[in-house]
Image (cartoon, rainbow, N blue to C red):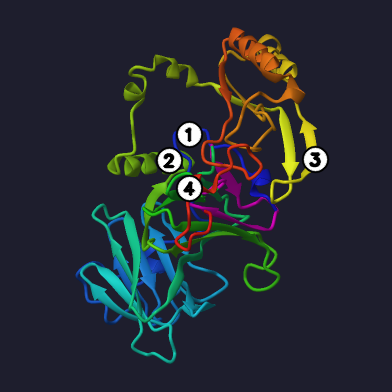
Amino acid sequence: MNTKSTSSMLACCCSVLIVGLAGSAVHPEDAVAVGGPGQNTSSPRATGEESIETPYIRFSISPRNGQYEIVDKQSNALWNSNPFHERLGEITLNAAGQKHSVSLDRSEIRRVDSGLELTFHPLIEQSAAWVQVLIRPLDNGKTLEFSYASSPDVPVESVRLLDQAFWVTDQESGYVAVPTRMGQLIPADSGKAFQETFDTYDNEGCDMEMLGVVKQGSALLVTWEDPYVEAEVRSTFPSSGPLAHRQVLSASLTLRRSAKSFRLQFEGFGDYVTIAKAYRKVAAERGWVVPWKEKLQGHPERARLFGAVDFRVGTLRRRMNAASKQEESVLIEETFPEAAQVAEHLKIDLKLDKVLFLVSGWIRRGYDNQHPDILPSAPECGGDAGLADMVQRVIRMGYLLSLHDNYQDIYRNSPSWNEDLIMKKPGGSLA
């Protein structure tokens, strides 16, 4: 199932993905064992939980199975771990090309300053091998940082720490916000079962290093600082158990290669706008925020983007086989004169004054074909003369015009094909 059918666009300065939220509001004194920074937590409540507490959040985890819960004391929202598996997450090992996964459940926990260090032993035959997860609050008291390390003898392929976490049901007015393109809002009551992955900076993945989750009016921001983080959003309908026949929306984070950590920032009462504003502060700290005052310097025409409708028109689509050698189908969606008529309809009939009019498929062989050789313009749609006329007609409507191109691909059937131009993988194969 494609989550796009259940999403709505996020009209805010930043869009975010996070994770499904869980549970109903609770009283903090009933939720978890208290063990604040500097306190002795050697004797937690009967379940054996260890805990971290700040003025804003309370986190508790069981060394017996890795299950945890977090109370956002600002809103009394309770956030739970995986409802289907009693564990913190799982680690995938790759030994001699053979992959297998091990649950991160039973652990040894000790306090490290104000945080908790969890030690797991994933290799039965090597009791000295270890994986350590450090959970610590950051200075603002609203944020928990999760990070991991492993001994050299543990062949880590990936680590999944947010494992179907912070789930929310169809009865809890929740959603996950994903920063894909303009943003996807995935509701917990869509009635759809699906599983969708969003790799960081991948096509149709997370365009920012973040996720967002909202439930019962409480907001959570998840951030990371590495491109090798994959987010997964899953919607299920359990057939048995306490959540039977209810839609359960959850999220997971998988850390690969250089990715070793992520952060959970609890915002109390809020929505996706709250999450966007919180992430904007994070982005500013990382030096990524450039004010429009600076963006407009030397390019005042960029102000025409403010409030503009992003409208896309496709022209020629040509489907080739995987080797780009055989044509499978040709579809003319709009000719160049027809595309110009669309722009005139938007202006004259629909009275849209601000539009970014994006045209795709205009190149010689159509959309995503034979790059980087784009000219002459698609003859099936009107050729160079037809394209030039369309451009002038769109500009006369006062619209911004964008011609879709692709600056990183080269196709085997293009006149410019040359393997020397292509990035190589470490083994020498083409990237």
The mark closer to the camera, 2 or 3, is 3
Q: Is residue 196 magenta?
A: yes
- N-term-proximal mark, 2 vs 3: 2
Q: Residues within 10 Å of mark 1 (few under 14, many from 20)?
A: some
Q: From the viewer's perspective, is residue 296 above or below residue 141?
A: above
Q: From the viewer's perspective, is residue 1 above or below residue 29?
A: above
Q: Amino acid at mark 2?
A: Ala
Q: Quadrant of residue 328?
A: top right
Report if the CB atoms under discs 1 and 2 are less than 8 Å apart: yes
Q: Which mark is residue 12?
A: 1
Q: Which residue is mark 3?
A: 329
Could one spot residue 33 in this view of the protein?
yes
- N-term-proximal mark, 1 vs 2: 1
Q: Residues within 10 Å of mark 4 (few under 14, many from 20)?
A: some
The mark closer to the camera, 4 or 2, is 4
Q: Which mark is residue 276?
A: 2
